[in-house]
């Protein structure tokens, strides 16, 4: 391995780091929108792995998966943000702890 | 090493020409608008106000740069920078002419030719909305915020019909490289009708062209879709709180986006630098004749001056025009200048349409704007794409 | 050059990712996410995925995140209040433990992969729009069609959810 090439594992490690950050944001944050964005971060991290694997096998399949993930993320964002808008309209809050009327 | 030097020179030339064009586009806009409204426009600084852009630049540079105490610091500075950086970087993939040879070096009249040139332009232009939205938000001012909100909703909505309108000619041309697209429109039907996308079979893209232009008005926040900066409702919209160079950055970004958009329209739909009719019928002589005609007019009016100083200024312009006409006929320069002339003529023609529309049409109401995007533009663009696809598949 | 570019954009991505998690205001978080997506797009280019890099910027940064920004601006969602009752122990232990977890993960990934797997820019050029399109419209035709139905459902759902109440 020469100095001009990056080990594939570095890409996967970066992907793992980003995914962990997404999980951390998902668990620790209390704002619905930030939680939602953490999910997007996790999806992005997974996409990076897909593209890296695709490079490793010199096949385009990983790109296709990434493309599908993007499409699903777009659909998810549309519905999710509509839900957030509705929640805000009904409760005037974006804190997930305050949306707990089904509890107890 | 050679590659870097050539690239640097090309970048310097393009940047210089682009910034000059940006400054003079504003002069052209003011002049055309003035004549639409039966006024004279800028007339004081230099002959026919030709030095007005210089005066404007000096004014904008030396004006006080206001920093309102209530704005959110970093984003307030970042937004105009983002606007100008994005709009300038889109120019990098636009080809202005064919391959040429200068001092023995063969090079393209383009900074870089990407395989995914069109996707690059779409990507850059889809990021442009951040500058406007962030400027509106960071200003901490209700008018600015409304402007930013309007901009983000409007630009997302109009991006869809724009992308659909762009997809249709791609089916005919079969490439995403802007250079390849122009090459796909070379040649003539029956030796006279150019094979531009708007004329090309099996389904001429004339509808796609019109759709693209309409969506382009909205993407560049121009009248009749300039809701984000509607001065009668929102003071100045998203750039209310900006002054001096930061204001100028937004201004330049808008003009630069207009140039990118019209260039893409010219490249995709109007055949780039391919002339309207073949060189066999003398298309190479259109440009020199135009400039020579301009020179003759200048000389005539210089001899019968309306005002005293026209006696001296107009003949000078006449000599300049004559020199340009001679350069267009000069064989070593011809392969560079003639394609450049056709490309510039198409872009300037489209820019004129932009200004003309601004001078003619009233502003839409916001709900009309949205209904128009989703109810008219989007279905028509879809239908256009569908028909193109079916016909391309059949023939 | 490859190493420098990778390290630069990986650092930007991680910095933006951390910023996303720690920032109080959703707008700052959204912008950090855009930063992550932008640097990931560059990494995709390094991996030879031209089309995916462009789609990443157009779809993610240009459409999805603008939608997020729009909603945040529309709701004028401020920062979140300090939630009381969190143990300090969690804060003190959490960060080192997370570092340990990441270290272990990196070590395992390093070990699991065969050594000579290196990424050189330009070694794989199968990610052009032509190749991706061909794969989508031949091999992955059925998933593609199903995704289009999913999008239709999402559009309907969004319209139903966001529609004003009609009395």
Image: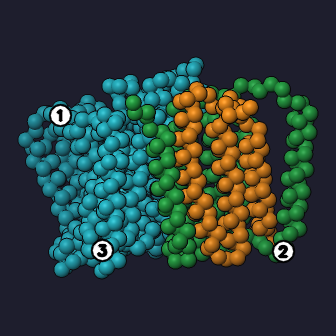
Which of the 4 quarters of the picture holds residue C114? bottom right
In this rendering, the answer to whether B264 lies above or below B138 is below
User: Percent x, y for residue B1?
Assistant: 61, 68
Task: Kindly tell me whether residue C6 is visible in this rendering.
Answer: yes
Which of the 4 quarters of the picture holds residue B138? top right
* Circle 1 chain: B
Chain B tint as drawn? cyan
User: Percent x, y for residue B122?
Assistant: 46, 56
Q: Please state if B247 lies on the left or on the right of B208 as rendered.
A: right
Classify mark 3: residues with Cα within 10 Å, few (<14), some (14-19) or many (20+).
some
Label 2 or label 1, whichever lies nearer to me, is 2
Classify mark 1: residues with Cα within 10 Å, few (<14), some (14-19) or many (20+).
few
Q: Viewer-proximal residue, B122 or C69? A: C69
Callout 3: helix, strand or loop? helix
* Circle 3 chain: B
Q: Residue at x 77, y 67 (%)?
A: A8
Q: Residue at x 67, y 60 (%)?
A: A47
Q: Residue at x 50, y 23 (%)?
A: B141
Chain A tint as drawn? orange
Callout 1: helix, strand or loop? loop
Q: Residue at x 47, y 34 (%)?
A: B148
Residue where numbered disc 1 is placed = B37
Callout 2: helix, strand or loop? loop
Q: Viewer-proximal residue, B105 or B127? A: B127
Q: CA distance from mark 3 to mark 2?
A: 50 Å
Q: Quadrant of the C terminus of chain A?
A: top right
Residue where numbered disc 2 is placed = C114
Chain C tint as drawn? green
Label 3 or label 1, whichever lies nearer to me, is 3
Residue where numbered disc 3 is placed = B391
Q: How are the colours assigned in the image?
A: by chain
């Amino acid at each position: 391995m020469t100095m001009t090439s990056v080990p594939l594992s570095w890409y996967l490690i970066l992907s793992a780091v980003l995914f962990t950050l997404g999980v951390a944001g998902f668990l620790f944050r209390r704002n619905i929108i930030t939680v939602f964005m953490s999910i997007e971060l996790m999806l992005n991290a997974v996409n990076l792995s897909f593209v890296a694997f695709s490079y490793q096998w010199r096949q385009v399949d990983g790109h296709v998966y990434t493309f599908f993930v993007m499409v699903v993320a777009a659909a998810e964002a549309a519905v999710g943000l509509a839900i957030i808008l509705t929640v805000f309209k009904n409760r005037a809050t974006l804190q997930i702890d305050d949306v707990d009327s089904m509890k107890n | 090493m050679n590659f870097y030097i050539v690239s640097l020179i090309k970048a310097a030339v393009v940047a210089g020409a682009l910034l000059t064009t940006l400054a003079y586009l504003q002069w052209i806009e003011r002049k055309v608008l003035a004549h639409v409204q039966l006024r004279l426009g800028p007339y004081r600084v230099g002959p026919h106000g030709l030095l007005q852009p210089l005066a404007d630049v000096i004014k904008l540079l030396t004006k006080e740069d206001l920093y309102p105490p209530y704005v959110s610091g970093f984003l307030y500075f970042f937004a105009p920078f983002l606007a100008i950086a994005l709009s300038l970087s889109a120019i990098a993939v636009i080809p202005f002419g064919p391959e040429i040879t200068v001092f023995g070096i063969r090079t393209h009249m383009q900074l870089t030719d990407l395989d995914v040139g069109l996707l690059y332009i779409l990507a850059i232009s889809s990021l442009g909305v951040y500058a406007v939205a962030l400027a509106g938000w960071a200003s901490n001012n209700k008018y600015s915020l409304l402007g930013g909100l309007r901009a983000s909703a409007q630009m997302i909505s109009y991006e869809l019909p724009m992308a659909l309108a762009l997809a249709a000619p791609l089916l005919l041309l079969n490439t995403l490289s802007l250079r390849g697209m122009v090459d796909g429109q070379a040649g003539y039907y029956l030796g006279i009708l150019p094979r531009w996308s708007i004329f090309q079979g099996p389904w001429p893209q004339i509808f796609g062209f019109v759709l693209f232009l309409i969506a382009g008005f909205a993407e560049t926040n121009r009248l009749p879709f300039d809701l984000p900066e509607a001065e009668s409702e929102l003071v100045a919209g998203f750039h209310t709180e900006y002054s001096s160079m930061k204001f100028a950055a937004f201004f330049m970004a808008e003009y630069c986006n207009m140039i990118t958009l019209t260039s893409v329209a010219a490249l995709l739909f109007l055949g780039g630098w391919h002339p309207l009719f073949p060189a066999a019928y003398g298309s190479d002589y259109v440009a020199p004749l135009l400039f020579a005609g301009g020179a003759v007019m200048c000389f005539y009016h210089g001899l019968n001056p309306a005002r005293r100083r026209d006696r001296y200024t107009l003949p000078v312009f006449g000599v300049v025009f004559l020199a340009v006409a001679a350069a267009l006929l000069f064989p070593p320069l011809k392969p560079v200048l003639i394609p450049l002339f056709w490309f510039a003529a198409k872009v300037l023609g489209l820019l004129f349409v932009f200004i003309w529309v601004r001078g003619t049409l009233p502003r839409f109401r916001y709900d009309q704007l949205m209904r128009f995007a989703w109810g008219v533009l989007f279905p028509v663009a879809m239908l256009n794409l569908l028909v193109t696809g079916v016909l391309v598949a059949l023939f | 050059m490859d190493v420098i570019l990778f390290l630069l954009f990986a650092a930007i991505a991680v910095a933006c990712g951390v910023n996303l998690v720690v920032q109080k205001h959703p707008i700052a978080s959204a912008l950090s996410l855009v930063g992550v997506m932008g640097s990931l797009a560059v990494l995709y280019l390094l991996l030879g995925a031209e089309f995916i890099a462009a789609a990443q910027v157009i779809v993610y940064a240009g459409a999805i995140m603008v939608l997020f920004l729009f909603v945040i601006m529309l709701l004028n969602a401020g920062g979140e209040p300090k939630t009381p009752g969190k143990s300090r122990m969690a804060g003190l232990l959490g960060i080192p433990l997370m570092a340990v977890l990441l270290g272990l993960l990196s070590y395992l990934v390093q070990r699991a992969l065969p050594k000579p797997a290196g990424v050189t820019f330009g070694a794989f050029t199968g990610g052009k729009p032509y190749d991706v399109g061909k794969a989508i419209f031949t091999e992955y035709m059925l998933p593609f069609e199903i995704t289009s139905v999913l999008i239709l459902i999402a559009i309907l759902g969004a319209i139903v959810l966001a529609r004003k109440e009609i009395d």
